[in-house]
Amino acid sequence: MKARSRLLSLGFLIVFCTATAWAQSGQLQGELVGPDGNALEGVAITLERTDAGGNNRYELTTNNRGYFVHLAVAPGDYEITFRAGDKQYLTLARLGVGQIEVKLNLQRLEYEGNEFSRISGQVEHVVRDIREMSATATIIRAPANDAEREARAEAARRASAVQEAFTAGRAALDAANYDEAISQFSLAAEADSTQHVIFGNLGVAYERAGMWPEALAAYEEAQTTADFQGVLPEEANYYRNLTLAHAMNGNVDRAISNAENAAAIDPAGAAQSFFNIGAVLTNQGEVEGAADAFGRAIDVNPEFSEAYYQLALAKFGADETIPEAIPLLEKYLELAPNGEYAEGAQGLLEFARGNQ
């Protein structure tokens, strides 16, 4: 059985994948210009989703340079409303993923920016009309005194610092500089503890640095901070991240619970959660539990080729289960004839057939 032991060693090197917390969001930033061409400070801007995809609502405020930002806006069709002076305005936008930049210009009564097109499937530059609405909301008044003016200025400085730290953290994460990413996301979180996407990215940075207890704490904070009635596309991602973090921290029961929650929201994507559990258990030598997790990944997604291969490897853990690997390896080769493990699968298949 030495040959079988050598082949089995392949099963303890599998790599898990994880979904990032911002995968289904857009980073919105924009500028509000008044009728005189000057930036408007302290204006409340509301984004209300109008399509069937969700009931998202976001409330932003312009800083002293007329800028506004939100780090995680779910894709969809939105009404954008705001009040400037004694008038209220409305325009429409179709927002996708990635960085979204807009300009609300009251000189021209137009919205100008980048939007997602359902027709072309691409991000396109668009110009839309801004309409005046009946003035029913409370007017945002000017600061009553120096203390209030300073408080607003401090809030604007804090918002700017959060944006700068978040952007620096993303850049560090992309460059695989995880210590710097952790530092920057931590600064952003200290300055603004209300945006779940900051904690989500902090969790990813900890995860990639191999700091699993810290990653788990950050992911749990992100999940607590998020209002999932408003960010449903992100909910499954957080459950998937928590699945892996719990598994790596040795709590398989909670990992499975989170994978099941992910499955209820996003059945196809949740297969990766169960696969990740199987990968962790395999690397820990818990073959029986790994086999169950890979089997559940296949139940969720019957086309998940790697899950068939890894489940087949688990069947080589005992002589009496080797025959059960044959249909699994055949299915893997059917789904991925030129896949990463095709050569190894063919060798294992021949070995298993020879042991019948």
Image (cartoon, rainbow, N blue to C red):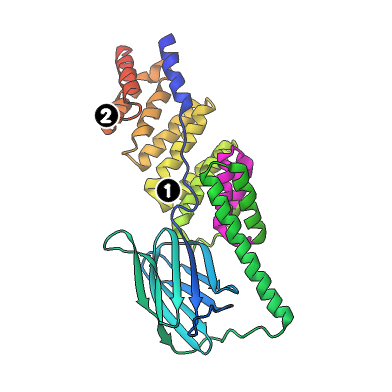
Q: Give the range drawn in magenta.
A: 192-220
Q: What residue type is labelled 1?
A: Ala
Is most of the magenta stretch helix, strand or loop?
Answer: helix
Residue 215 in the magenta stretch? The answer is yes
Q: In the rendering, at what x and y percent does residue 285 appear?
A: 52, 25
Residue at 48% x, 55% y is 235
Across the whole image, how many numbered discs are drawn on residues? 2
> Image quadrant of residue 179?
top right
Q: In the rendering, at what x and y percent does residue 145 appear?
A: 72, 84
Q: What residue type is labelled 2?
A: Pro
Q: In the rendering, at what x and y percent does residue 194 appear?
A: 60, 62
Residue at 32% x, 28% y is 328
Foreground residue among 206 and 245: 206
Q: Closer to the N terminus: mark 1 or mark 2?
A: 1
Q: Is residue 280 left or right of residue 304?
A: right
Distance CA(mark 1)–CA(mark 2): 28 Å
Residue 150 in the magenta stretch? The answer is no
Classify 10 Å Cα crowding around label 1: few (below 14), some (14-19), many (20 and above).
many
Secondary structure category for the residue under label 1: helix
Q: Residue 346 carries which label?
A: none
Q: In the rendering, at what x and y percent does residue 4 appear?
A: 41, 14
Q: Residue 263 carries which label?
A: 1
Residue at 50% x, 42% y is 256
Which quarter of the image is occupied by the N terminus? top left
The residue singled out by tag 2 in the image is: 337
* Residue furthest front as drawn: 37
Residue at 66% x, 83% y is 143
Q: Measured along the vertical axis of the image, is residue 354 above or below residue 248? A: above
* Residue furthest top as drawn: 2
Secondary structure category for the residue under label 2: loop
Q: Can residue 118 be seen in this view?
A: yes
Frontmost of labels 1 and 2 is 2
